């Protein structure tokens, strides 16, 4: 049976490279810059999402206020938002103002 000899790479410590190649440097710089840009964009999107979430809460509060005002004035807040028609329950009399 023949013996196989493992080849080991011998690195001469006296001849170490001082820098990576210009192409490698350019590639790593572009990759890091792309990563940073993407993370910055995600941060901006998250801030916008946060702002929109707060705006939605404020709009819901405003809608609740309007519904309470309609309930007080008309006895219901069931309003057709397309044409403004009040949808009264079947057992409520309508007081029309002429």
Image (cartoon, helix red, strand yellow):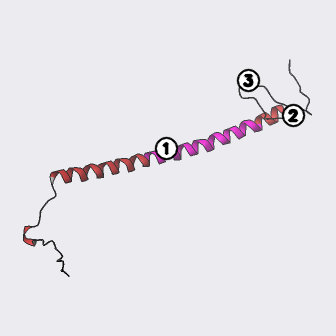
Q: Nearer the viewer, residue 18 or 77?
A: 18
Whichever of labels 2 and 1 marks the residue nearer the N terminus, that label is 1
Q: Are marks 2 and 1 in contact (CB under 8 Å)?
A: no
Considering every residue shown, the one lying at the far left of the view is 14
Secondary structure type for disc 3: loop
Q: Magenta part of the protein: which range?
A: 43-68
Left or right? Give the position of 6 relative to 36.
Answer: left
In this figure, which residue is indicated by the disc labeled 2?
89
Query: Which residue is depicted at the point 78% across and 25% down?
Result: 85
Left or right? Give the position of 67 relative to 11.
Answer: right
In this figure, which residue is indicated by the disc labeled 3?
83
Q: In this figure, what is the number of numbered marks? A: 3
Quadrant location of the N terminus? bottom left
Considering every residue shown, the one lying at the far top of the view is 98
Query: Which residue is depicted at the point 7% across and 71% down?
Result: 14
Within the magenta stretch, is there residue 45?
yes
Above/below status of 87 relative to 29: above
Kindly report the distance in space between the C-alpha atoms of the residues bearing marks 2 and 3.
18 Å
Within the magenta stretch, is there residue 39?
no
**At which x and y percent is residue 42?**
43, 48
Query: Which residue is depicted at the point 21% across and 50% down?
Result: 26
Q: Quadrant of residue 87?
A: top right
Kindly report the distance in space between the C-alpha atoms of the residues bearing marks 2 and 1.
41 Å
In this figure, which residue is indicated by the disc labeled 1?
48
Query: Which residue is depicted at the point 84% across and 34% down?
Result: 75
Kindly report the distance in space between the C-alpha atoms of the residues bearing marks 3 and 1.
33 Å
């Amino acid at each position: 049976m023949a013996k196989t000899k493992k080849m080991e790479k011998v690195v001469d410590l006296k001849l170490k490279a001082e820098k990576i190649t210009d192409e490698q440097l350019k590639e790593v710089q572009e990759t890091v810059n792309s990563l940073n840009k993407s993370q910055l964009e995600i941060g901006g999107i998250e801030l916008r999402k946060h702002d929109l979430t707060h705006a939605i809460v404020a709009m819901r509060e405003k809608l609740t206020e309007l519904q309470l005002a309609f309930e007080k004035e008309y006895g219901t807040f069931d309003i057709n938002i397309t044409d403004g028609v009040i949808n009264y329950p079947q057992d409520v009399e309508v007081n029309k103002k002429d």
